[in-house]
Image (cartoon, rainbow, N blue to C red):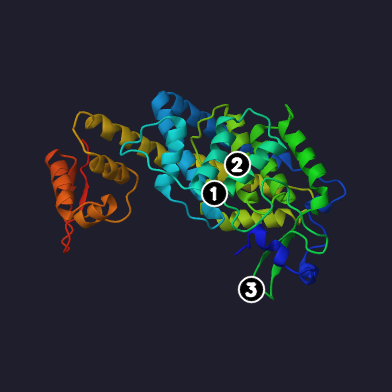
Amino acid sequence: MLYSTHFMRRISCIFTHKMRSMYLHQHPKWPDFHFDFPKTYWALVDVRHHQGKLLGQMQSLGFNLQKQAALQNLTLDVLKSSEIEGEILNPEQVRSSIARRLGLDIGGGLIPADRNVEGIVDMMIDATQNYSEPLTAERLFRWHTALFPTNRYKMTIGAWRINAKDTPMQVVSGAIGNEIVHFQAPDSDKLDAEMQKFLDWVNSTDPMLDPVIKAAIAHLWFVTIHPFDDGNGRIGRAIADMLLARADQTPYRFYSMSAQIRIERNAYYYMLEETQKNELDITEWLAWFLQCLDRSIAATDNTLAMVLKRKKFWDTFATEPLNERQKKMLSKLLDDFEGKLTSSKWAKMNKCSQDSAIRDIQDLITKGILEKEDSGGRNTNYALKELA
């Protein structure tokens, strides 16, 4: 497991002999990246073809369904980007927080979200909805502050990290006393110049550089600089999402790169580390990034199916009178409810009596919305009735 960067200062410099003698940022020609274009060309062609096809499909669905699909994918982005770093967020809070910002009625009502959820949602919404706005140090500082509203680790918040020469910022793994150093970031006294060079490049226009390739380079470049005490991975992925939104020319996210990276997390960390050893040749990183992105676009079939299923359901039962508990539980069932639904679980989740739960469920059975499952167990289970 990789230690989060707020632990890095605890690592004594006696371990620095385990590091490579040179990383990307230490190369004399840094950051003059280069890559073998023929090796990435066809992967880029595939990605652009599938992006265009997906955007065409989504535009044919209409404005409301586009927003529903964006809600689904932004929720995945927030949840999975946090999971990559080992942080598990409440899915309902994330979805409600995003829905409020998109002005969407998600059925079952919106629930309040804690500050950590609101913070990362603020960052992702700003990155994707305001994708055409320049990326500045002040904007990154706002994102960083939003990610750590309580500063429980007493880090430098909303500013570049500060570390002494004898305690470099390192990414390590392994038990204390037997650490393996995977990477060492630039010293903090170089960050102003490094980040200004990066931001100038992000905000520049190069007609010879495809925006998708730019997203891949930006993510690698940012995490190589590692300008913050913590949160570099999440902010780096938000930057990539912002540039992918520029590539798509739409604020609506119809695929989730972070969800695919979560599935391929080991390969993701491996590619980031290996690329640091290849001087300034980033061919293999770009090839992996493009293939991962293509797989994330392919996965949208499931997302679209869920959006269409939800729409069909609420259209079918739009005129049925439902109480708030019923709306809440139906919304959960439409979002891949975990486990089996029982009257006891209904009562617990709604903080109501068992009798109220049974009445709610029986009413939905009468209306043709729920049905009993033939489970054969001690408890009766219920599920959504399949629509014709």
Contact between marks 2 and 1 (CB within 8 A): the answer is yes
Q: Bin the neighbour count of mark 2 within 10 Å (Cα to Cα): few under 14, some 14-19, many 20 and up.
A: many
Residue 239: give x, y in percent of width and height: 63, 40
| Residue picked out by circle 1 | 81
First in sequence, mark 2 or 1: give its number.
1
Figure check: 157 above or below 59: below
- Where, quadrant-wise, is the N terminus in this rendering? bottom right
Front one among 22 and 338: 338
Residue contact at pointers 1 and 3, CB within 8 angstroms: no
Q: CA distance from mark 1 to mark 3?
A: 25 Å
Q: Which residue is mark 2?
A: 238
**Mark 2 or mark 3, earlier in chain:** 3
- Per the image, the residue denoted by label 3 is 175
Q: Please name the amino acid that badge 2 sits on.
A: Ala
- The structure residue drawn at horizontal position 23% and vertical position 53%, both measured from the top left corner, is 347
Amino acid type at image mark 3: Ala
Q: Position of residue 383 (x, y in %)?
A: 22, 48
